[in-house]
Amino acid sequence: MRRRIYPFILGDPGLPMRALVLGGSGQLGLELREVLSNYEVVWTYSSREVPGGVKLDVRDFNSLEDLVLRTRPDVVVNAAAFTDVDGCETDRERCLKVNGEAVKHLVRAARVVEAYVVHVSTDYVFDGERGNYAEEDVPNPVNYYGLSKLVGEAYALSYDDSLVVRTSGVFRHKGYVPYALRALREGREVAAFRGYYSPISARKLAQAVHELVGQRRTGVLNVAGERVSRYDLAVKLKEMYGLPGKVREVQDVQGWKARRPFDSSLNSSRARGLISVELGLEENLEDLLKVEEVR
């Protein structure tokens, strides 16, 4: 196979440190590109053409390794993932390749260039039977998405210079939180699943990752917001901004193919002692409004 050549100047001591962001066109990736301002950022996208980025399907393992080897980043943040939980149930091959096997190849190349790796994982590695999960709790995924992310964690942790960041309900312009805000603002009814999680804005998560990269932490660390039900979150949005819509709690959501953990909330007390980023519910929801202002 012919190796691709990327137009980056390598080895120039006058350049700042380089960060490679996989999944740079996603919600977290967009924020990472902004907060990693002290790095020369190389970032990837996977589908539609995005100016400034490098097109990469992480399932093309040769190209993934090639990109790491040629750009020689000081830091790699893996924000690339197949996050469609129901889609992961029906397309398990793609799910495992993107969320699991790609991490093996990323780590293999990172070892060669001695890059520090931050791998973003999920609260869905837990079964949701009790919630408030700490880093040392034993994972037990109840769907294929969670299983594939757990495989990715194992590959990431096989490399000594890596950090697995477990997070929950990341939102920016997509996800449950923006949906609830739009629906309530338009006077519509929001059907809210009663399960619990720990939603965090992509901006807060990116800021936290930036701080942790500076500390070069390793192992597993939970970085997520406060424990809240989707119902209580929607009610909070309605009250904070005086929105006209209504909130209705539902016991289950019709049409789900994959089982969801009832309470996948994460205990982020360890991270709170390491970073300056505020992870409270109101602070996270305020970020949603800031994103809307610049769109």
Image (cartoon, helix red, strand yellow):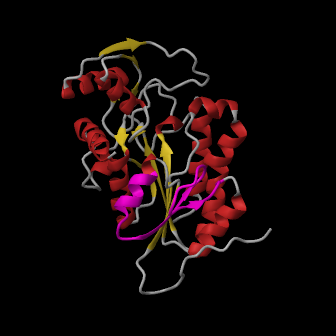
32 up-or-down from 169: above or below: below
Which quarter of the figure has residue 103? bottom right
Q: Position of residue 79 (x, y in %)?
A: 50, 52
Residue 178 sits above or below residue 19 on the image: above
At 45% from the left and 53% from the top, the residue drawn is 29
User: Is 31 part of what is drawn in magenta?
Assistant: yes
Instruction: Report whether residue 112 is seen.
Output: no
Which residue appears at 61% of the width and 38% of the height?
Answer: 147
Residue 69 in percent (x, y) is at: 62, 73
Query: In the rendering, at what x and y percent does residue 203 appear?
Result: 34, 49
Highlighted magenta segment, given as a residue range? 29-58
Against 266, residue 45 (above or below) is: below
Please count the marks in the image. 0
The outermost residue toward the bottom is 13
Frontmost residue, 156 versus 234: 234
Front residue of 210 and 138: 210
- The quadrant the C terminus occupies is top left
Residue 105 as seen in the image, left or right of residue 121: right
User: Which residue is depicted at the point 47% across and 38% down?
Assistant: 123
Where residue 108 sits: x, y (%)?
Answer: 64, 65
Among all residues in the image, which is located at the extreme right? 1
Magenta-span inclusion, residue 61: no
The foreground one among 22 and 260 is 22
**In the rendered view of the protein, which quadrant contains the N terminus?**
bottom right
